[in-house]
Amino acid sequence: MGLPTITVPQYHLTVPSTGKEIKFRPFLVKEEKILLLAMEGEDQKQIVSATKEIVQNCIFGDVDVEGMPAFDLEYIFLQLRGKAKGEVLELKYKCPQCEGEIPLAVNLDDVKVIKHKDHTNKIQLTEELGVMMKYPDLELQEIIGKTVEGKSHVEGLFETIVHCMDYIYDNENTYPSKDHTKKEMNDFLESLTDEHFQKISKFFDTIPALKHDVELKCPNKAKGKSKNKDRKNCGYEEKLTLEGLGSFFA
């Protein structure tokens, strides 16, 4: 006779990039083990792989996480974590003034992917010519990060754009970036006017992102002497924007 099993609840969420509703379950001990092992190794590639594996395990239906935009994957992962371990996430920050710990409670139900109203991934450069951009997934983000390391802002921007161009199109044909060399893609970028280049750059300025605004208030006792004799607490305050999955594991 087999061992009894526990029925795991199912939930719904809306994928930010597509607006499609999907079903999911909270991650279980087996998924938490995958994540903990990856984090112990401190290998970013393993952490990315573990995150994708956990999300793929926990969502139902024909949804492939390979190539999924990073902000979608981050949002889904936080939803899985919230249903598995509770919606309130307890974080800690070091106070830059008194060096004590500042506790911060974040309700994951309040964390959303912020979308800019003017954002589009279809960039119409002229009446005849345009570029379709693709959202970087977690792996592409890592590749871009390594590629632009140590380079100037302009060089880094060029590298990022080249990696995120899905295809170029005109009135008759499409030209997938995968069918062309990096040099050809760079040459195309360099042939644009500044106006055209700024249109493409705006894609990154307005790209959806997992963001949440919080306020830090230090509750610790003040260190040393203070000019204000009535001040017993440190009193440090700061407005902070949590952005990206890593910010929610401080």
Image (tube, grey):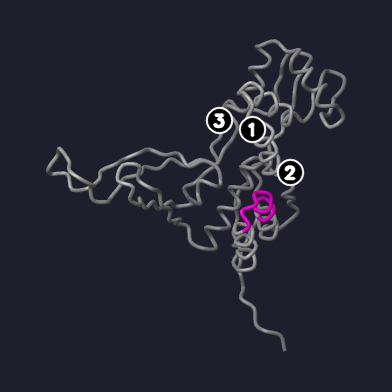
* Residue assigned mark 1: 149
Please provide percent x and percent y for residue 3.
Answer: 67, 84
Q: Which of marks 2 and 1 is nearer the N terminus?
A: 2
Q: Nearer the viewer, residue 176 or 109?
A: 176
Please provide percent x and percent y for residue 110.
Answer: 46, 48
Q: Which residue is the extreme one toward the left? A: 229
Q: Earlier in the sequence, mark 3 or mark 2?
A: 2
Please provide percent x and percent y for residue 207.
Answer: 60, 32
Q: Which disc number belongs to residue 67?
A: 2
Is mark 3 in CB contact (under 8 Å) with mark 2? Answer: no
Q: Name the kind of residue labelled 2 in the image.
A: Gly
Position of residue 249 relative to residue 215, above or below, is below
Q: Residue at 78% x, 16% y: name it.
A: 129
Please provide percent x and percent y for residue 46.
Answer: 68, 53
Is residue 44 part of the magenta span, yes or no?
yes
Q: Nearer the viewer, residue 93 or 25?
A: 93
Q: Which disc number belongs to residue 51?
A: none
Q: Which disc number belongs to residue 116?
A: 3
Q: Which of marks 3 and 1 is nearer the N terminus?
A: 3
Q: Which of marks 3 and 2 is in front?
A: 2
Q: Residue at 72% x, 29% y: name it.
A: 133
Q: Residue at 54% x, 47% y: name it.
A: 246
- Magenta stretch, residue numbers: 41-50
Within 10 Å of disc 1 (Cα), the crowding (few <14, some 14-19, many 20+) is few
Q: Which residue is the extreme one toward the bottom? A: 1
The answer to whether residue 144 is left or right of residue 108 is right
Within 10 Å of disc 3 (Cα), the crowding (few <14, some 14-19, many 20+) is few
Element assignment for label 1? loop
Q: Name the kind of residue labelled 1 in the image.
A: Glu
